[in-house]
């Protein structure tokens, strides 16, 4: 049995995660949720004075806007779409017949107007663009959403439905890169306060296919993505618990996000993987929260 399986098994045995029979799709206990809630309050304490505008979107987004985002060009392998039965009574009978005999009953399901949100910030850009030019101070937003990615795994830190807390900044290049740097510093400090050792490294997104290799190289060469890594299932390959992304003006151009003077906005986003942070805490301090160091408990629960 490898390490990953055993940490997942211990999480199931302790009840912190609840097995649904699907890899990467888990229920969470009250205790697990309480750790996430406490960590989100810590995020609020670090980010609260910045005056970000909070918005919460559901875990599904407008399919037309998802299509426009270009997600299917870059990450077709991760996307999840919502399909529904849209047929007649006759179609219904054949659907039930298919189920009865164990054939594929999903083949006539039709795509709805909704796809599962792949990252918390995706619904934001078109929403902000609709408002017109950004104010002189730029834009700063506070988001949290369940996100879907089709990447089933036995690694408890790689889930298919997980929560991402994000701050998104829109403004000049200097403004948004300063924002990103300040959250890298804050991220290190926050994790130190809860007793976790971290490293920060340059990273890339898993762009699909041969054309994707060029995107990966470009992203790394230009330092567009950094990750804050914490050992969870492997110390040789620590897990990304936060990411810090600079999109240059690509989302500004795509969505028509403009600054007060009409120039194209640059954007950056900072994401916290909430389940991963909770798992890092349980992995490092033990599965029983009562046994965690007093200093850590104090930071999280006062
Ligand atoms: P990884 O390299 O591990 O796949 P990522 O680069 O895909 O991570 P992002 O796309 O930057 O991650 O997402 C923002 C944050 O969401 C990550 O820093 C991570 O904490 C969290 N996250 C990403 N994918 C998952 C997942 N499958 N399960 C749980 N959390 C995730
Ligand atoms: Zn984002
Ligand atoms: Mg990934």
Image (tube, rainbow, N blue to C red):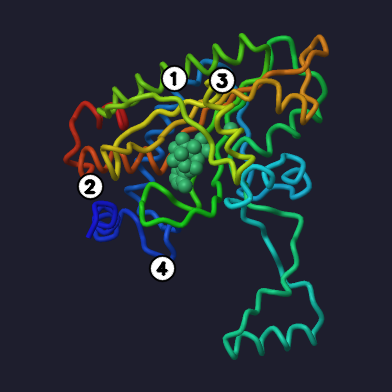
Q: Nearer the viewer, mark 1 or mark 3?
A: 3
The mark nearer the N terminus, 4 or 2, is 4
Disc 4 target residue: 21
Mark 1–mark 3 contact, CB under 8 Å? no
Task: Give 220 or 13, whichever is nearer the viewer.
Answer: 220
Tell me the element at label 3. loop
Which one is nearer the viewer's eye here, 186 or 209? Answer: 209
The relative height of residue 102 versus residue 264 in the rendered view (above or below) is below
Mark 4 or 2: in front is 4
Q: Distance between the residues labelled 2 and 1?
A: 28 Å
Give the quarter of the figure containing the C terminus. top left
Q: Kindly report the distance in space between the C-alpha atoms of the residues bearing marks 3 and 4.
A: 41 Å
Label 3, on which residue? 222
Q: How crowded is mark 1: few (under 14 residues within 10 Å), some or many (20 or more)?
A: many
Name the front one of labels 2 and 1.
Answer: 1
In the visual, does 122 lie left or right of 222?
right
Q: Looking at the rendered structure, which numbered label has been put on residue 287? A: 2
**Residue 222: quadrant of the picture:** top right
Q: How far apart are marks 4 and 1 (CA)?
A: 36 Å
| Label 2 Cα neighbours within 10 Å, binned few <14 / some 14-19 / many ≥20 | some
Percent x, y of residue 56: 61, 38
Residue at horizontal 72 percent and vertical 87 percent from the top:
94
Dot 4, how many residues are within 10 Å of its Cα: few (below 14), some (14-19), or many (20+)?
Answer: few
Element class at badge 4:
loop
As drawn, 264 above or below 38:
above
Side of 99 relative to 34 (left or right):
right
Q: What element carries label 1?
A: helix
Q: Which residue is pictured at 67% across the width and 60% down the height? A: 82
The residue at which mark 1 appears reads as: 184
> Which tag, 4 or 1, sits closer to the chain's start?
4
């Amino acid at each position: 049995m490898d390490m990953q399986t055993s940490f997942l098994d211990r999480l199931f045995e302790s009840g912190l995660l609840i097995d649904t029979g699907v890899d990467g799709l888990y229920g969470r206990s009250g205790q697990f949720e309480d750790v996430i809630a406490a960590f989100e309050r810590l995020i609020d304490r670090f980010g609260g004075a910045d005056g970000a505008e909070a918005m919460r979107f559901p875990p599904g987004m407008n399919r037309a806007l998802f299509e426009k985002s270009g997600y299917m060009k870059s990450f077709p392998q991760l996307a999840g779409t919502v399909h529904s039965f849209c047929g007649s009574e006759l179609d219904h009978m054949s659907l039930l017949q298919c189920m009865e005999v164990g054939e594929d009953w999903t083949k006539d399901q039709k795509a709805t107007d909704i796809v599962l949100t792949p990252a918390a910030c995706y619904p934001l850009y078109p929403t902000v663009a609709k408002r017109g030019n950004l104010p002189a101070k730029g834009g700063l937003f506070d988001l949290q959403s369940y996100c879907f990615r089709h990447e089933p795994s036995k690694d408890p830190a790689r889930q298919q439905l997980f929560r991402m807390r994000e701050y998104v900044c829109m403004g000049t290049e200097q403004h948004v890169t300063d924002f990103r740097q300040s959250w890298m510093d804050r991220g290190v400090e926050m994790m130190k306060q809860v007793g976790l050792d971290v490293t920060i490294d340059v990273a890339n997104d898993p762009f699909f296919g041969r054309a994707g290799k060029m995107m990966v190289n470009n992203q790394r060469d230009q330092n567009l993505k950094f990750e804050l890594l914490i050992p969870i299932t492997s110390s040789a390959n620590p897990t990304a618990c936060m990411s810090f992304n600079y999109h240059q003006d690509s989302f500004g151009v795509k969505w028509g996000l403009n600054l007060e003077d009409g120039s194209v906005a640059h954007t950056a986003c900072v994401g916290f993987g909430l389940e991963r942070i909770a798992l890092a805490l349980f992995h490092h301090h033990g599965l029983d929260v009562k046994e965690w160091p007093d200093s850590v408990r104090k930071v999280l629960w006062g």
